[in-house]
Structures are given as C-alpha cells and as structure tokens.
Image (cartoon, grey):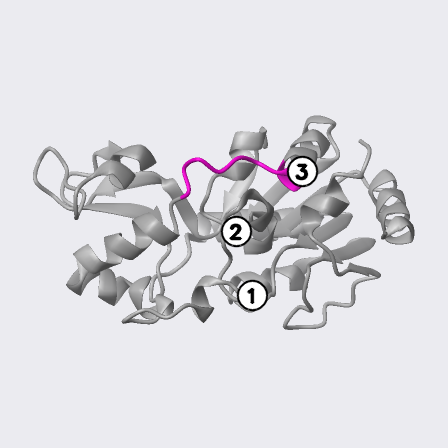
Amino acid sequence: MYEQEVKQLQEMIDDSRRIVFFGGAGVSTESNIPDFRSADGLYQQKYKYSPEQIVSHTFFVHRTESFYEFYKEKMMFLDAKPNAAHKKLAELEAAGKLTAVITQNIDGLHQAAGSKNVLELHGSIHRNYCLKCRKFYDAAYVKNSEGIPKCSCGGTIKPDVVLYEEGLDSDVINRSIQAISAADMLIIGGTSLVVYPAAGFIDYFQGKHLAVINKSTTAREVGAQLTIAAPIGEIMGRITV
C-alpha cells in the first residue's frame, strides 16, 4: 500500500536541501502515547473534569493535586521509545537535509531518536522547575513523587509544558517561523492543525514542496501537493536517506 505516495514523497525529499518537519501528537501514537482528538484520544475519555480544564493554568494553580494525578497517568510515558518516524527524521538531519523539527509534543522522543534541532512549541515533560527557587528536576522525579512533587526548598514543582491559558515561548515561536520561512520543503505530520497559534505557523512556508502525512483529514486546507492518509511511522520508515 501507498507505493505511489511513498515514491512521490521520496522524490520530493531527494529534491530538497532545507526540509522542516512540523508535527503533532500523531507522530507519537505509534510509540503507544495517546493523542488528544482521535476516536480513542484523551478528549473522548470521561473524567470528572474535561482534559482541557485539567491541563489549564487555572486548574494547576487551584487543584494542583488533581492536575498531577491526571498528568502523571495520562501525559507522562517515560518508557516510550522513538518509532520509525522519529528515527527517520533524525537520519535526515544527520544527512544535512533536514534543518529543524518543530513539534507540539512534550514527550522528548525526537531528541531520544537523535534529532538535535528540535523546537518544542509546548515544552517538555523532561524539564521541571521549582516555582520558588527554579531548581531543575527531571521527569522521573516528578513521575515517582507522591502527590504534588515538591522541591528540597519546599516549593511546588511545575512541568515546563505550556498549559491552556499560557503563552508560547517567544524565542521558540521566532525560531520556528524562521525555519519554516527558509525551508524548501515542509512536511506536516501527525497533526490535525487545530491548535493555534502553532497551526498558523505553516502560513510562513514559501518553499517548493509541501506534504501532509496524517491518518485523518486536517482541520484546514494547506494546499499540499501530496497528502497521505496513513500512520506517519509507516510512511517515513520507507524513505531512504
């Protein structure tokens, strides 16, 4: 299956020198990390509060323990391993063809696969800071803590992830826009293009080749010359570098 689509994607990649990848939760579902909006995603499950409420700044401040119950169980997957998509993107970067990975994911799997220039729009579960003294803690400390993770100074630890009601990091935004603007190929993968402002960044692309690889249709039409409705790891795993 998808022989013709993979062949066309390969030709586009072979013809490009400054590829940027823009990805979302669908990139990590093949690593057994649930996404949010698909039929079996987190937003379809039933909780006392909606996931949107739970992962908001207000909820974190006022119901910190409940936030961490959900966050540790549903958003921290420390045993997850990079899949074929993560690995192929790292190979493309090592070969000097891919200039940046821009991700909405917080799982750190792109770095685990070997990618160096990863722009994390929504932060990372692997960076955690005390709100009082700014001391750093890794993901394992947070995951294994009882209740609310606390710093040695007594302060509450907060994950360096962008919650609802919080703004994106301006430096990451600027670097993402610069990378997309300078790209001659943009691959959009594993994202429904629902979450803004991130989804709007692709409007800065002025290059030659635009491909979308996503199991379901995206929320907006981006004018891609190639659209593949398939799991991204399955497709990217068949690309040769």
Q: Label 3 sits on what residue type? A: Ala
In-image side of 195 versus 240 (left or right): left
Q: Which residue is mark 3?
A: 84
Asked if residue 227 is among those painted magenta in the image, a careful observer would answer: no
Percent coordinates x, y for residue 114 in the rendering: 58, 28
**Residue at image coords 66%, 54%:** 189
How packed is label 2: few (under 14 Cα within 10 Å), some, or many (20 or more)? few
Answer yes or no: do the residues labelled 3 and 1 have beta carbons within 8 Å?
no
**Residue at image coords 11%, 43%:** 155
Which residue, as the protein is rendered here, is positioned at the far left? Answer: 154
Mark with earlier residue (3, 1): 1
Would residue 138 be seen by someone viewing this image from the given angle?
A: no
Percent coordinates x, y for residue 23 in the rendering: 60, 52
Percent coordinates x, y for residue 41 in the rendering: 50, 63
Mark with earlier residue (3, 2): 3
Q: Secondary structure at mark 2?
A: helix
**Magenta stretch, overall SS:** loop
**Residue at image coords 86%, 52%:** 1
Q: Secondary structure at mark 3?
A: helix
Residues at marks 3 and 2, CA–CA distance in whole angstroms: 28 Å
In-image side of 176 versus 168 (left or right): right
Q: Which residues are magenta?
A: 77-86
Q: Which residue is mark 1?
A: 38
**Residue at image coords 86%, 43%:** 10
Percent coordinates x, y for residue 61 in the rendering: 19, 61
* Residue 200 vertical placement versus 190 (above, below): below
Q: Secondary structure at mark 1?
A: loop
In-image side of 149 versus 215 (left or right): left
Q: Which residue is mark 2?
A: 174
